[in-house]
Image (tube, helix red, strand yellow):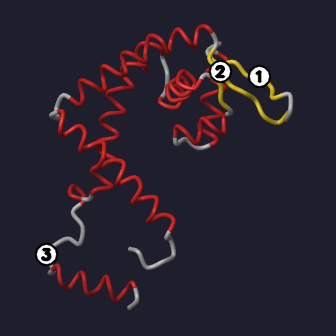
Amino acid sequence: MSNDATRTRARDAAGPDRALLELERFLPYQLNVLMEAVSRSLSKLYGERYGLSVPEWRVIATLGQYRTMTAKQIGAHSRMNKTMVSRAVSALQRRGVVRRDRNANDRREEFLSLSDEGREIYDDLAPRAARFADTLLEALSVEERAHFTQMLWRLEERAKQISAARGKDII
């Protein structure tokens, strides 16, 4: 059955006054709204205190955790595209927060790490970010937190499966 025929049948089943999709109940939309609200709240912490953008904070947090990485590795870990990482790293380097060291074996690659100032920012912000997350999770019981984490992992894995099956009749 064609997609047009499927949509027509769905519309007919929904009735003339009923929407095919209620955005407020649509999981991808709900997750995006949650992510935006959390990100906006957290950005007040690092934005107001240090004037950092979301991508800059992600670079600092990633380098704080892993010490040394390439821009490509930061992008993969923090789910940012190459352009976002490049702009964030350039801004942080101008501020003296990030250091670049050429890879002696591959002159096209650079290893990135936090400068002393960058490490101070990370050491100040990381515990505050952890407290932010703990405060946010206070809305859930200990059991709900464990289930929520498991559900997030399962949904992420399922989304990867759906993405990998692109072009197949999974949806």
Amino acid found under the numbered disc labelled 2? Ser
**Which residue is at the front of the view, 88 or 127?**
127
**Res 59 → quadrant:** top right
Where is mark 1, residue-wise?
Answer: 101
Q: Is residue 54 left or right of residue 22?
A: right
- Please tell me which of labels 1 and 2 falls first in the chain: 1
Mark 3 vs mark 1: in front: 1
- Please tell me which of labels 3 and 1 falls first in the chain: 3
What is the x, y in percent for residue 67?
A: 61, 22
Q: Residue at x 52, y 37 (%)?
A: 78
**Residue 41 sits above or below residue 108 on the image:** above
Circle 1/circle 2 CB separation < 8 Å = yes
**Residue 70 sits above or below residue 98 on the image:** below
Q: Is residue 85 left or right of residue 47?
A: right
Label 1 environment density (alpha carbons within 10 Å; few <14, some 14–19, many ≥20)? few
Amino acid found under the numbered disc labelled 3? Asp
Amino acid found under the numbered disc labelled 1? Asp
Q: Residue at x 21, y 63 (%)?
A: 22
Q: Residue at x 51, y 65 (%)?
A: 164
Q: CA distance from mark 1 to mark 2?
A: 8 Å
- Please tell me which of labels 2 and 3 falls first in the chain: 3
Kindly state the secondary structure of the residue where label 3 is placed. Answer: loop
What's the mark number on residue 113?
Answer: 2
Where is mark 3, residue-wise?
Answer: 17
Kindly state the secondary structure of the residue where label 1 is placed. Answer: strand
Q: Residue furthest bottom?
A: 1
What is the x, y in percent for residue 146?
A: 25, 39
